[in-house]
Image (cartoon, helix red, strand yellow):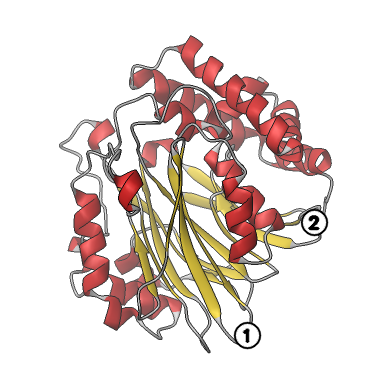
Amino acid sequence: MKLRTALSRETDAVARGRELGTAFAPQYAQTAALYVAHFSELGIGARDVRTIAERSRTALEAWAPDLAAESDAIADAAGIERWRLAAVGARTEILAVAPPRVGECSTAVRVGAGVAAESLQTWDWHDFLVPEALLVEFRATSGLDVKLFTEFGTPGKIGVNSAGVGLHFNILSHESDSAAGGVPVHAVARRVLDEARSVDDAHRIAASAAVSASTVLTVFDSNGSESRAMALELSPAGMGVVEPGPDGWLFHTNHFLDPMLSEGDTMSDETTAVRLAHLDGVRAELTGLEPTARALAACGGHGAAAEICMTPDPTLPRLDQWATLLTVAVDTEGFALEVFPGRPDEAAAAGLARF
């Protein structure tokens, strides 16, 4: 995966969308084409894809009109039909009607009194869907500066803002997920980064979104004297909140931890529990390290064989091939992302780049 970077000085959503759509027209067009083909490969008909995308676009316009306008402006500038780019923005909502995924992401965040937040995430996905991705910095209409990593077409994913709020993103699966086309969960992540000045703000924003697919947003903040975190488990059935453990560590993979919501969990991936147990097992080794050392410690001495490191198996059908496409740490006090396009063991060897 190749990482592209952008600095937008446009605070108006439409102007920013035009700027990004013009600068990265080939990337937006390619990503939209790849996802529409992928949905077909999963057995989701073109009519259903468009219907869910347009329903989610309508829900987004009602909940966050600036984000809907930005998406439309990107599509127009890039020469893409609006619903096709909206389908990328609502990719989780469309995938909710497909069989539950295998693989995905692992997140670790440590907070507490007198310490700055420490975090690490692996983002796992199909490498054939993301030949390129975007790191972008901009000023939101709220006045907050935002830095985020995302795919070309999704409004947000992993990031940090100048108020000291950070966010990690893991997909979930629940029996209440449907084709209703709710507010895209990637847009929920983006609005948190655009507006939240604390984890309490993030909680309020996330709770206001009527979603049709499930995801967990692990949000955290640092204010100099303390840092706080919570995992917001979103689902159509409601939102669960998971707090850090006594030592300040909060781990999440791809299954619900809220007791009530876990009863409706439909994630078939057996590795999600294994990955969570792995993080729990290395928690002491992760504490107090700078990002590159943290990435190495996350491997637990297993290198590429670590449970949280995914490498595609070329002997399998491509839908069964998963890769760790990004290792990322969020620096809430320094307003930065530390990133590497690959596994934690590779990041430890090469070093993470600061954005």
- 268 and 133: which is toward the camera: 268
The image shows residue 13, relative to residue 60, as above or below, that is below
- Which picture quadrant has residue 71? top right
Q: Residue 187, image x and y in percent?
A: 60, 42
Q: Give how far across and how far down residue 335 sits, in percent.
A: 64, 72
Q: Is residue 282 left or right of residue 240?
A: left
Q: Is residue 33 above or below residue 248?
A: above
**Would you name the residue on which mark 2 appears?**
142
Q: Amino acid at mark 2?
A: Ser
**Pointer 1 or 2: first along the chain:** 2
Visible in this render: residue 5?
no
> Is residue 190 visible from the viewing direction of this image?
yes
Q: Which residue is situated farthest in the top direction here? A: 47
Q: Amino acid at mark 1?
A: Gly
Q: Quadrant of the C terminus?
A: bottom right
> Which residue carries the number 1 mark?
224
Residue 28 in which image quadrant: top right
**Is disc 2 placed on a helix, strand or loop?**
loop
Residue in the picture at 34% in, 66% down: 344
**Cβ–Cβ under 8 Å for marks 1 and 2:** no
Residue 99's disc is: none
| Residue closest to the far left | 315
Q: Going by the image, does 159 lie left or right of 269?
A: right
Residue that appears at 53% across and 35% down: 211
Percent of width and height locating residue 146: 68, 60
